[in-house]
Structures are given as structure tokens and as C-alpha cells.
Image: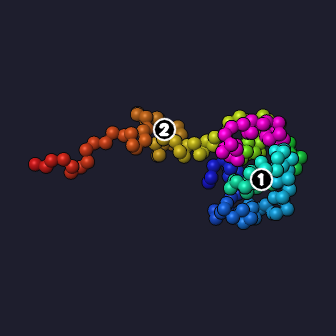
Amino acid sequence: MWGPLTQGLKVPNNLDLSDRAAALEQLGVGAAVNSRLVNMVKDYVGSERETALLVATRAWPLLAARMAGVARSPEGETGLRARLKAGLGDDPAWEQGPPGEFAGRMVGQVLRALTTPPGGPVPDGPRVSATAARSRSTTTPAGAAPGRAAPAEAARPAYRQAAGPAKGSGPRR
């Protein structure tokens, strides 16, 4: 529905991320759980200001739902803490870059930490969803199915395709 942030989550169709309290409630994250998750993130980010920036993003309810899911899994809260430590505490790369993109880098780093299997290294770059990539691809025709032959010529964006003269235009006899 919304890309990597929602992949694997049960997201209601009427989710409105502009209403944080309602979004958290719809995603099954109560106020007490949310408060505990914020404190947990603060332990690994280190700064209350930076934690507030992360929590203020529109993506926070989705991250909180994913974090709550990890905490409810067999890994438990210990596994969640280990993932956050590996993603935020042990890898400070998210702190470097333009200040205007800081919150986005934090969201990306937390998402990578939460979606990386325990014990595995946190990937450096963003993870690409194969389904999302296929849906936005311009290299395969819309009706092509896997296993079919490739088209004779490469796909081109509409604005690059050669267009003939419009029907009915030009001098008439």
C-alpha cells in the first residue's frame, strides 16, 4: 500500500497518519505501549531532541506498530532492544548528512533495523521491495507476465515516444 513502511503490517484502508492518536489506536498501539517505545528509542538515540524529531514524523505510528510487533514476537522486548541497538546505537551513519534530511534518515535507519533479521548486519542502503519496483517499472509492458519473451524494443516513457502528425492536422486538399 505505502511501500516498505507498511510491508508486512496490517494497515487499515482508512488510516490517517495526520491524526497520530487515532492512527496509533488503529494500528493496535496503545498510549502506554507508545510511551514505552518512545523511551526505548531514546535509550539508543541518546538525545531527547532527536527522539522527538523521530516521534514527530508521520511515519512514527507505522514504526511504532512494527516495533510493537517485534516486542510481541518470540524475540520479545529483548530482541527489539537488540535490533534498535544494532541499528541506532552501533551504527551512527544516520547522524551524518544534511540537517534537513535528519528525520528521514532516522526513519530509514529504524525501519532497516526492524526489518533486518536478528544477528544479521543492518544494510547500508534502503531495501527495495520487488513488488513495488515491478509496479513502477517502465521496462516491461503492462500485460507481460513472468516467463514471457521480452519485447522487441525497449520500453520508453510516453514523452520520449515518437509521435506522428495528428490526424486531421496540416493542409487539406
Q: Residue at x 81, y 45 (%)?
A: 45
Q: Quadrant of residue 98 in the image?
A: top right
Give the secondary structure at mark 2: loop
Q: Quadrant of residue 12 in the image?
A: bottom right
Residue 59 at least partly seen: yes
Neighbour tally class for label 1: few under 14, some 14-19, many 20 plus, Cα within 10 Å? some
Where residue 26 appears, as percent x and y from the top left, is: 73, 64
Give the secondary structure at mark 1: helix
Q: Which mark is residue 52?
A: 1
Any magenta on residue 92?
yes
Where residue 22 appears, as percent x and y from the top left, is: 72, 66
Q: Main secondary structure of the magenta part?
A: helix
Count of residue discs: 2
Any magenta on residue 66?
no
The stretch of residues the image draws in magenta is: 83-105
Neighbour tally class for label 2: few under 14, some 14-19, many 20 plus, Cα within 10 Å? some
Q: Nearer the viewer, mark 1 or mark 2?
A: 1
Q: Residue at x 47, y 35 (%)?
A: 149
Identify the image quadrant of the N terminus.
Answer: bottom right
Q: Earlier in the sequence, mark 1 or mark 2?
A: 1
State if disc 2 and disc 1 touch (CB < 8 Å).
Answer: no
Callout 1 amino acid: Ala
